[in-house]
Image (cartoon, rainbow, N blue to C red):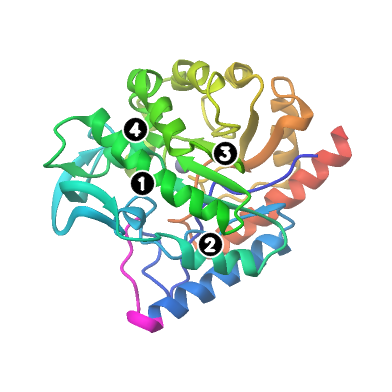
């Protein structure tokens, strides 16, 4: 009961990359960098296991950023000439690469870290990929001239990599779609369909993570403008509930999302955010168990998966480690309370 996992990313150690940044620079190059990424991946797998998490991830230690890590292996993208672009409906500016030609994978994208992680844990392994709509919102288009067409082109490439990850032994493939919470109508109109294209043919568990972003200042400022009730999920959950995606990861603890919106996900596994990714305050096991208890009003016991609200990448490493422990201990307490 209550299998635990994180949304996906974890902080990179200071010897691997710059700390507390969303687009950190690597500290090494070539073989040395490859080894450092492998070391960091193993370190975080061990930390997740020690914290008692049931489903572990590679912590996204091998990619600079969750979207651009994928794009680096895509032909048709110009990384040499990045441009400044407002992303997530102009919430903040990012330096993004440009799509300049038809898209094609150069080869495998995440084989190295997925196979490494698989070889070193017996726990269930989750692997995260950016969703098509969020990719389209994090790259400049000089070629397709049509958002939807470009999203489906990316969805095809994501599907190729996802099928290969499944063959590597990954148990759960999760697509991250923070853009769903920004372009709710588009998400319901075509975003969920593009997501299903990315997941086509997968027989492993499929998941989607939809959040209000990392705990960076631009996101915190944006949340302040969203009012007392955050009802974005209300517009996209019905389309997701009708989709083939099996699990949905959402923000809960410390958010202004009305918890009853979780009822819109009937039939899905719900990864409930019980750990705040935007605050350094460490949750107590009691707080985690209380959040699980509150969510039980809207999600059946066997479908409730305690999780973090979002990735922990930009956090302090020690804080992230303590949050993993709080998640593990809180879920254990909830099993005793509600079992
Ligand atoms: Zn997130």
> Which quadrant of the rendered structure holds the N terminus?
top right
Query: Mark 4 and mark 1: span between their CA atoms?
Result: 31 Å
Per the image, the residue denoted by label 2 is 114
- Mark 1 Cα within 10 Å, few/some/many (few <14, many 20+)? some
Viewer-proximal residue, 258 or 35?
Answer: 35
Label pair 4/1, CB-CB below 8 angstroms: no
Measured in 3D between alpha carbons, the distance from the residue under mark 2 to the one under mark 3, in whole angstroms, is: 16 Å
Taking 83 as reference, is 334 above or below it? above
Q: If you read the primary sequence from the N terminus, does the residue marked by circle 2 or circle 3 appear first?
A: 2
Residue 251: horizontal and vertical position, in percent? Answer: 54, 34
- Identify residue for label 3: 206
| Range of magenta residues | 22-32
Q: Tell which tag, 1 or 2, sits nearer the viewer.
A: 1
Identify residue for label 1: 157
Callout in the foreground (2, 4): 2
Mark pair 2, 4: CA separation: 34 Å
Gap in Å between the C-alphas at discs 1 and 2? 17 Å
Q: Residues within 10 Å of mark 3 (few under 14, many from 20)?
A: many
Quadrant for the C terminus, please: top right
Q: Which one is in front, 201 or 322?
A: 201
- Residue at image position (59%, 71%) is 43
Sooner in the amino-acid sequence: mark 2 or mark 4:
2
Q: Disc 4 marks which residue?
A: 222
Q: Residue 315, can we see it?
A: yes
């Amino acid at each position: 009961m209550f299998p635990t996992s994180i949304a996906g990313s974890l902080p990179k150690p200071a010897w691997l990359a710059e700390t507390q940044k969303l687009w950190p620079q690597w500290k090494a190059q070539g073989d040395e960098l490859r080894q450092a990424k492998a070391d960091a991946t193993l370190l975080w797998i061990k930390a997740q296991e020690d914290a008692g998490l049931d489903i572990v991830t590679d912590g996204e230690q091998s990619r600079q950023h969750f979207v651009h890590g994928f794009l680096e292996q895509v032909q048709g993208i110009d990384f040499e000439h990045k441009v400044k672009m407002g992303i997530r409906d102009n919430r903040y500016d990012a330096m993004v690469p440009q799509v300049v030609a038809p898209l094609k994978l150069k080869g495998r994208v995440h084989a190295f870290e997925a196979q490494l992680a698989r070889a070193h844990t017996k726990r269930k392994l989750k692997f995260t990929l950016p969703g098509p709509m969020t990719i389209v919102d994090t790259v400049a288009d000089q070629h397709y001239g049509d958002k939807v067409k470009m999203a489906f082109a990316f969805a095809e490439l994501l599907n190729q990599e996802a099928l290969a990850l499944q063959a590597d032994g990954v148990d759960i493939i999760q697509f991250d779609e923070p853009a769903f919470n920004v372009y709710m109508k588009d998400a319901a109109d075509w975003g969920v369909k593009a997501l299903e294209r990315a997941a086509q043919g997968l027989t492993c568990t499929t998941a989607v993570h939809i959040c209000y972003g990392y705990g960076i200042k631009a996101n915190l400022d944006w949340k302040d403008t969203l009012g007392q009730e955050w009802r974005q999920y209300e517009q996209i959950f019905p389309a997701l509930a009708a989709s083939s995606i099996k699990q949905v990861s959402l923000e809960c603890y410390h958010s202004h999302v009305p918890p009853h919106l979780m009822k819109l996900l009937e039939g899905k596994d719900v990864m409930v955010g019980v750990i705040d990714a935007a605050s350094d305050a460490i949750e107590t096991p009691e707080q985690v168990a209380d959040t699980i208890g509150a969510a039980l009003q809207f999600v059946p016991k066997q479908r409730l998966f305690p999780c973090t609200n979002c990735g922990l990448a930009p956090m302090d490493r020690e804080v992230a480690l303590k949050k993993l422990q709080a998640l593990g201990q809180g879920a254990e307490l909830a099993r005793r309370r509600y079992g």
